[in-house]
Amino acid sequence: LDLFGKQIYLPSPEVLLAMKLNAVVQRGEGHKEEKDLYDIVALAQYVKRPVELKTLQELYTPDEESKEELNTILTKRCTDAWQWQSHFGISGAVAKKIILRLVG
C-alpha cells in the first residue's frame, strides 16, 4: 500500500483473521468478544478478495478446548437479539455460519 509517498506493509486478511480468532477465545472480556466477532465478520465479508481458507486454516490451528470455547462464544453472541442486523444486515445465525466456515 502506498500512503503519503511511503510504502506501507499490512498483514494479509488471513493473518488478521487468525489473530482475531485467537483473540476472541483468549481475551475473556464480553465487550472485546463482541468487537472481535464484528471484526471477523467484517474481514470475511468485505475484503477486496476472497479469504483463502486453506491459508487461514494453516495459520489458525486451535486446540480442542479453544474450539469448544469458540462454539460457546458463538452460541452466546450470535443471537438475533444481538445487533448483527444493525451492523451488517445479517442475522446472528448467518454471522455464526460465516465464522464457522472460516475455521473449517
Image (tube, rainbow, N blue to C red):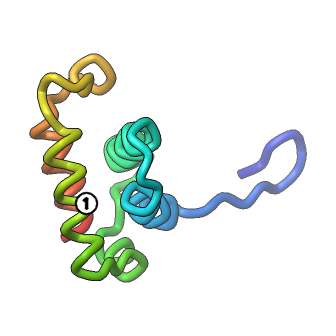
Q: Residue furthest right?
A: 5
Report the amino acid beneath label 1: Leu
Q: Which residue is mark 1?
A: 70
**Viewed as shown, does residue 9 lie left or right of 18?**
right
Residue at screen point 35% across, 44% down: 37
**Can residue 51 be seen from the camera position used here?**
yes
**Residue 14 image position (x, y, % from top left):** 44, 65
Image vertical order of residue 56 relative to residue 2, above or below: below
Residue at screen point 13% across, 50% down: 97
Image vertical order of residue 94 relative to residue 103, above or below: above
Query: Which picture quadrant has residue 51?
Result: bottom left
**Residue 9 image position (x, y, % from top left):** 72, 60
**Residue 46 image position (x, y, % from top left):** 39, 40
SS for callout 1: helix
**Residue 76 image position (x, y, % from top left):** 18, 42
Image vertical order of residue 43 relative to residue 17, above or below: above
**Viewed as shown, does residue 89 lie left or right of 94?**
right
Decide which of 15, 49 is in the foreground and name it. Answer: 15
Decide which of 14, 63 is in the foreground and name it. Answer: 63
**Viewed as shown, does residue 89 lie left or right of 75?**
right
Residue at screen point 28% across, 17% down: 86
**Viewed as shown, does residue 5 lie left or right of 52?**
right
